Image (spheres, rainbow, N blue to C red):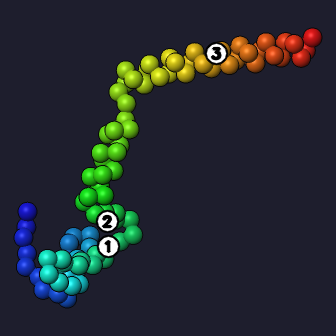
């Protein structure tokens, strides 16, 4: 990790047209301004970590996916059978 010292109003320029400027330093809080091309995503680390945790929690294993497909297949075949029997009565 590169560690730099900057004062309020000073910037660091990264490759790709990204500029990070120290906007304000007050107490233990540093406010940064980031200028970057529109296609560059800029995210706070705690948000990225929270999204990663939620994605991991929401994901299911291949085995769980197959079990769910099997269960859903049972429901769709029952649903199709009731729809088919309903059509037969309407046609008669």
Report, in whole angstroms, how far the alpha carbon at label 3 lies from the one at label 2. 47 Å
Q: Earlier in the sequence, mark 3 or mark 1?
A: 1
Q: Position of residue 18 (x, y in %)?
A: 26, 73
- Tell which of 8 and 13 is nearer to you: 8
The answer to whether mark 2 and mark 1 are in CB contact below 8 A is yes
Q: Position of residue 59 (x, y in %)?
A: 37, 35
Report, in whole angstroms, how far the alpha carbon at label 2 lies from the one at label 1. 8 Å
Q: Position of residue 55 (x, y in %)?
A: 35, 43
* Residue topped by disc 2: 42
Closer to us: mark 2 or mark 1? 2
* Residue topped by disc 3: 77
Residue count near mark 3 (Cα–Cα under 10 Å), binned few <14, some 14–19, many ≥20: few
- Tell which of 41 and 8 is nearer to you: 8
* Residue occupying the point 12% across, 86% down: 7
Helix, strand or loop under label 3: helix
Query: Relative to 11, is 67 on the left or the right?
Result: right
Quadrant containing the N terminus in the rendered view: bottom left
Q: Earlier in the sequence, mark 2 or mark 1?
A: 1
* Residue occupying the point 44% across, 19% down: 67
Helix, strand or loop under label 1: loop
The answer to whether mark 3 and mark 1 are in CB contact below 8 A is no
Q: Position of residue 16 (x, y in %)?
A: 26, 70
Whether residue 12 is visible, yes or no, is no
Q: Residue furthest bottom?
A: 9
Closer to us: mark 3 or mark 1? 3
* Residue topped by disc 1: 36
Q: Residue furthest front?
A: 27
Closer to us: mark 3 or mark 2? 3
Helix, strand or loop under label 2: loop
């Amino acid at each position: 990790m590169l560690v730099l010292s900057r004062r309020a109003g000073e910037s660091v320029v990264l490759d790709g047209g990204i500029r990070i400027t120290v906007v304000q330093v007050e107490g233990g809080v540093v406010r940064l301004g980031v200028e970057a091309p529109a296609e560059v995503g800029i995210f706070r680390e705690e948000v990225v970590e929270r999204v990663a945790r939620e994605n991991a929690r929401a994901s299911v294993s291949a085995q769980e996916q197959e079990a769910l497909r099997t269960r859903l297949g049972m429901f769709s075949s029952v649903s199709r059978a009731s729809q088919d029997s309903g059509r037969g009565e309407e046609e008669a």
